[in-house]
Amino acid sequence: MSFSRFERPVVIQLSRHGSERIVFDVNDAATILLRDLPRQTVKSKLAMDTCLQVLRGKAHPPAARRAFVAAALEAKILRSD
């Protein structure tokens, strides 16, 4: 789904000794939010909702990217924005 790609990828690191992951699109971001974040917060829920809106065609990828970056920053997994 090329319509859900981020203009610029987001780099995260899920654990201190884990390798960095490059998040290229909304699907990747949603999967990480769902499976890999240790706890749900207001920011992570907002990011998931925004990702779902993009996948449904009701929002644009930059909105999901901004929300994902905010959730990653809060979770202290953001390495590069």
Image (spheres, grey):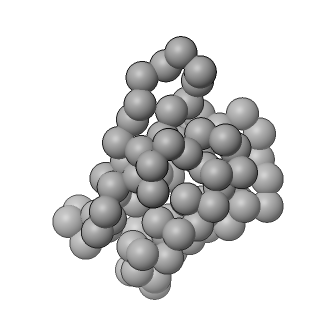
Q: Position of residue 40 (x, y in %)?
A: 76, 47
Report the residue at 71% width, 51% height from top.
Answer: 74
Q: Find residue 6 and report its image quarter.
A: bottom left
Residue 28 lies, with reference to residue 48, above or below; the image says above
Q: Is residue 64 left or right of residue 73?
A: left
Report the residue at 63% width, 61% height from top.
Answer: 70
Report the residue at 79% width, 61% height from top.
Answer: 42
Q: Position of residue 62 (x, y in %)?
A: 42, 75
Q: Find residue 55 and report its image quarter.
A: bottom left
Report the residue at 40% width, 59% height from top.
Answer: 26
Q: Is residue 20 left or right of residue 40?
A: left
The outermost residue toward the left is 2
Residue 42 lies, with reference to residue 19, above or below; the image says below
The outermost residue toward the top is 17
Q: Is residue 22 left or right of residue 76?
A: left
Q: Position of residue 39 (x, y in %)?
A: 77, 39
Q: Nearer the viewer, residue 60 or 78?
A: 78
Dividing the image into 4 quarters, which one contains the C terminus? bottom left
Is residue 81 visible to us here?
Answer: yes
Q: Is residue 25 left or right of residue 50?
A: left
Is residue 27 visible to us here?
Answer: no
Residue 15 lies, with reference to residue 28, above or below; the image says above
